[in-house]
C-alpha cells in the first residue's frame, strides 16, 4: 500500500537579541501567518513549482507566540526544500528574524516531546516572571493535545 | 564541533588607519554570543584588507572588548598569539580566533602576505581575477589556508576544476559564506550561482561553510546551514562535513603552517622568533 509520508518539523523563530531580552514581547502570529510565511518563501526561492508541490500537504500544527516555537507538517518528499527555505527566511511580517529548526521527525509524537522540552527551556530562560508555571502548563497541554 | 570561520570586522577596519568603534565591537560581541548559543564552538573574527598588508593592520585588535564566555586565541593586553589550535574549549564556552583575508589583485600585493605570518590564526586570500586565483591555488604563497571568493558579486573569472584541485591537493580549503544568500533577491541568485560553481569545481571536498555574519540575526544554526547545501547540489553528508571536519582541517592546516617547524616540532607556547631559534639550533634551516 502506498502510504503518504510526512515530516514534522519543530522550529523556533529567533528575533534580534535586543528584542528577545525584552522578554514579554510575543511575536503576534497565528497558524495562518506561519503558513503564509513559509509558502511565500518557498515560492520566492523555489518558484511556483516548488510552492505547488507543498500546497496540499503542508500544515501548521502549532505555534506558540510567547516562545515562538512552532510545528509544521511537510510531505516527506519535499522536506529538504522546506528546510532549506526555513534557513533562508529573514523576515516574519516585517520583523527581522531567523529560523532555527530544532527537531525533525516522521511522527508527531517525538516532535511533541522535543517541542515540550524546548518550550520549557525557552520559557525558563526568557520569561522569568510570575506566570512561568502557567505558561509551562499551557504550552505542555497545547502541544500534547495535537492530533495527527 | 561546529566552526564558523568568518565573522567579519567592519570593512572600514581594513583600510589604512582603520579602527573598529565600540558600537561595532558590541555588535560583533553579540554575534559571537549568538554563535555560542547556536552551538558553534570555534569562531574566527575576520579582518579584510584590500591589497597590501601592513603591520598597522594589527593595531585594530587592540580595542577588542570583553567577550562573555569566550576564550580568545590572543592576549588582549599585548596582542600576541596564545597557545595552539588544539587547546580545548571549556563547556559552554566559545573559542575566538583571528583571521585575515587579503583581497589580492596582482602579484605585488601577494608578496606582502609573507610579512604577517604567525600573527593571525588563519590567513585567507580573496583573489579578484584569474591569475590570482591560480596563484592562490597552486601554492605560490605559502601563507594561505582558505581561498575566499566573494559570493554576492559577479565574478570576472571562471572557477575551473583544474585550478581548484591544485588547492585541494595542498590542503587549502575553499570557503562558501552564506550571508549573501540572506541579503536580498539579486544577491541570493548570484550566491547560488557562485556557490554552486565552487561546489562543482571542488566536487564538495574541502569546502567550508562560513557565515560572514554582519549581525547576530545573520547566523544560522549548524544543521540549518548544512540544509542550505541542498540548493547547491551539495548533498547531506558533504554539507555536514563542510561545517565540521573540513573547517577543522583548515584550522589544522593553519596551525601546522604557523606554529610548527616542518610539521614535526611544535613548541608548547610559541613565542615570536622561537621557531626560528629552534630551526637554527637543530640545523633544519641552512
Image: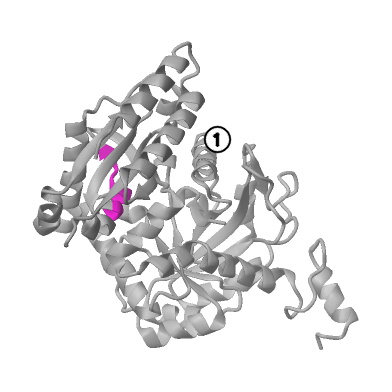
User: Vertically, is A77 above or below B89?
Assistant: below
Q: Which residues are drawn in magenta?
A: A83-91
**Image-based side of B82 in relation to B170, left or right:** right
Give residue B127's quadrant in the image.
bottom left
Image quadrant holding the N terminus of chain B, namely: bottom right
**What residue do we see at 46% from left, 17% from top?**
A132
Q: In the image, residue A75 lies at what x, y percent? A: 21, 53
State the predominant SS element of the stretch in magenta: helix
**Image-based side of B213 in relation to A76, left or right:** right
**What residue do we see at 35% from left, 69% from top?**
B235
Tag 1 residue:
B22
Q: Give the residue furthest to the top.
A: A130
| Res. B15 in view | no
Image quadrant holding the C terminus of chain B, namely: bottom right
Is residue B223 shown in magenta? no
Q: In the image, residue A2 lies at what x, y percent? A: 16, 62
Label 1: chain letter: B
Classify mark 1: residues with Cα within 10 Å, few (<14), some (14-19) or many (20+).
few
Which residue is nearer to you in this view: A139 or B250?
A139
Q: In the image, residue B126 lies at what x, y percent? A: 45, 68
**What residue do we see at 87% from left, 86% from top?**
B283
Amino acid at each position: 500500500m502506498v502510504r503518504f509520508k510526512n515530516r514534522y518539523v519543530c522550529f523556533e523563530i529567533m528575533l534580534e537579541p535586543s528584542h528577545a531580552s525584552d522578554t514579554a514581547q510575543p511575536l503576534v502570529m497565528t497558524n495562518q501567518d506561519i503558513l503564509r510565511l513559509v509558502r511565500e518563501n518557498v515560492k520566492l526561492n523555489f518558484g511556483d513549482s516548488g510552492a505547488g508541490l507543498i500546497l496540499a500537504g503542508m500544515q501548521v500544527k502549532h505555534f506558540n507566540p510567547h516562545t515562538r516555537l512552532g510545528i509544521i507538517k511537510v510531505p516527506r518528499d519535499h522536506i529538504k526544500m522546506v528546510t532549506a527555505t526555513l534557513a533562508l527566511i529573514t523576515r516574519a511580517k516585517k520583523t527581522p528574524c531567523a529560523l532555527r529548526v530544532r527537531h525533525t521527525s516522521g511522527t508527531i509524537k517525538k516532535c511533541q516531546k522535543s517541542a515540550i522540552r524546548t518550550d520549557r527551556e525557552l520559557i525558563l530562560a526568557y520569561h522569568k516572571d510570575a506566570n512561568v508555571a502557567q505558561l509551562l502548563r499551557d504550552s505542555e497541554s497545547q502541544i500534547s493535545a495535537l492530533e495527527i | 564541533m561546529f566552526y564558523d570561520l568568518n565573522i567579519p570586522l567592519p570593512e572600514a577596519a581594513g583600510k589604512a588607519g582603520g579602527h573598529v568603534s565600540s558600537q561595532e565591537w558590541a555588535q560583533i560581541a553579540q554575534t559571537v554570543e549568538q554563535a555560542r548559543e547556536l552551538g558553534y564552538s570555534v569562531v574566527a573574527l575576520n579582518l579584510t584588507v584590500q591589497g597590501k598588508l601592513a603591520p598597522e593592520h594589527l593595531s585594530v585588535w587592540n580595542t577588542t572588548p570583553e567577550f562573555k564566555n569566550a576564550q580568545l586565541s590572543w592576549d588582549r593586553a599585548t596582542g600576541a598569539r596564545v597557545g595552539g589550535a588544539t587547546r580545548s574549549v571549556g563547556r559552554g564556552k566559545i573559542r575566538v580566533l583571528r583571521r585575515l583575508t587579503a583581497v589580492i589583485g596582482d602579484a605585488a600585493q601577494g608578496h606582502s602576505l609573507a610579512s604577517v605570518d604567525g600573527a593571525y590564526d588563519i590567513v585567507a586570500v580573496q583573489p579578484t581575477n584569474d591569475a590570482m586565483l591560480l596563484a592562490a591555488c597552486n601554492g605560490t604563497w605559502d601563507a594561505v589556508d582558505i581561498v575566499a571568493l566573494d559570493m554576492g558579486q559577479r565574478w570576472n573569472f571562471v572557477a575551473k576544476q583544474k585550478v581548484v584541485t591544485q588547492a585541494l591537493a595542498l590542503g587549502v580549503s575553499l570557503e562558501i559564506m552564506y550571508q549573501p544568500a540572506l541579503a536580498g533577491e539579486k544577491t541570493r541568485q548570484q550566491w547560488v550561482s557562485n556557490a554552486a560553481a565552487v561546489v562543482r569545481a571542488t566536487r564538495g571536498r574541502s569546502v567550508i561553510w562560513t557565515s560572514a555574519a554582519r549581525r547576530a540575526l545573520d547566523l544560522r544554526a549548524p544543521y540549518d546551514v548544512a540544509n542550505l547545501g541542498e540548493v547547491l547540489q551539495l548533498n547531506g553528508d558533504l554539507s555536514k562535513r563542510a561545517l565540521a571536519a573540513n573547517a577543522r582541517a583548515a584550522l589544522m592546516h593553519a596551525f601546522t603552517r604557523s606554529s610548527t617547524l616542518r610539521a614535526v616540532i611544535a613548541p608548547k607556547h610559541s613565542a615570536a622568533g622561537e621557531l626560528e631559534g629552534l630551526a637554527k639550533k637543530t640545523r633544519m634551516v641552512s
